[in-house]
Every structure is written in structure tokens, then in C-alpha cells.
Image: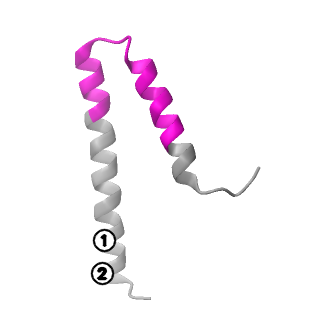
Amino acid sequence: MSNRHQDGFDLKGLAAVLHELHGLPIGVQYAALAVVVIIVIASLIAGCWMVSHFHV
């Protein structure tokens, strides 16, 4: 296992998931998209919080 940058892997995984979602009802697609957005926002907030509370 190579220790490559994770973004490429995550984007490929996300693209595969979105491709799979294409066959599902539109409501399911929107629900999945909402979950992804919530996770991204939550991780950004957590990152900002950690940076502001733990100055390196």
C-alpha cells in the first residue's frame, strides 16, 4: 500500500458512488448529496475549531 495523497482516492471513490447513485430515484440522490455536504461542512468546522483551539 503506497502512502499517496488521499484526495485522489477519495475523489475516485466519490465519483464511483455518484455513478452508482445515477440509477436511483432522485430523492435518494438528493439525500445522499445532502449527507455528503453535511459531512464536508462538519469536517471543515471541526478543522477550523481544532486550528483555533490548538495553535501549533
* Residue 33, picture quadrant: top left
Residue 6, position as x, y percentages in the image: 57, 53
Q: Is residue 12 magenta?
A: yes
Three-letter amino acid code at disc 2?
Ser
**Whether residue 22 is situated above or below residue 55 in the rendered picture:** above
Residue 27, position as x, y percentages in the image: 22, 18
Mark 1, Cα crowd under 10 Å, few <14 / some 14-19 / many 20+, is: few
**Whether residue 27 is situated above or below residue 14 in the rendered picture:** above
* Residue 28, picture quadrant: top left
Chief secondary structure of the magenta span?
A: helix
**Whether residue 49 is situated above or below residue 45 in the rendered picture:** below
Between residues 27 and 12, which one lies in front from this camera angle? 12
Between residues 24 and 8, which one lies in front from this camera angle? 8
Three-letter amino acid code at disc 1?
Cys
The residue positioned 53% from the left and 37% from the top of the image is 12
Instruction: Classify the position of the C terminus by image quarter.
Output: bottom left
Name the element at disc 2: helix
The residue positioned 27% from the left and 45% from the top of the image is 38
Q: Which mark is residue 29?
A: none
Look at mark 2 in the image and give the residue it sits on: 52
**45 left or right of 22?**
left
Q: Are marks 1 and 2 in contact (CB under 8 Å)?
A: yes
The residue positioned 52% from the left and 36% from the top of the image is 13
Look at mark 1 in the image and give the residue it sits on: 48
Q: Which residues are magenta?
A: 11-33
**Whether residue 38 is situated above or below residue 47 in the rendered picture:** above
Mark 2, Cα crowd under 10 Å, few <14 / some 14-19 / many 20+, is: few
Q: Is residue 46 magenta?
A: no
Residue 46, position as x, y percentages in the image: 33, 64
The residue positioned 74% from the left and 53% from the top of the image is 2
- Residue pushed farthest bottom? 56
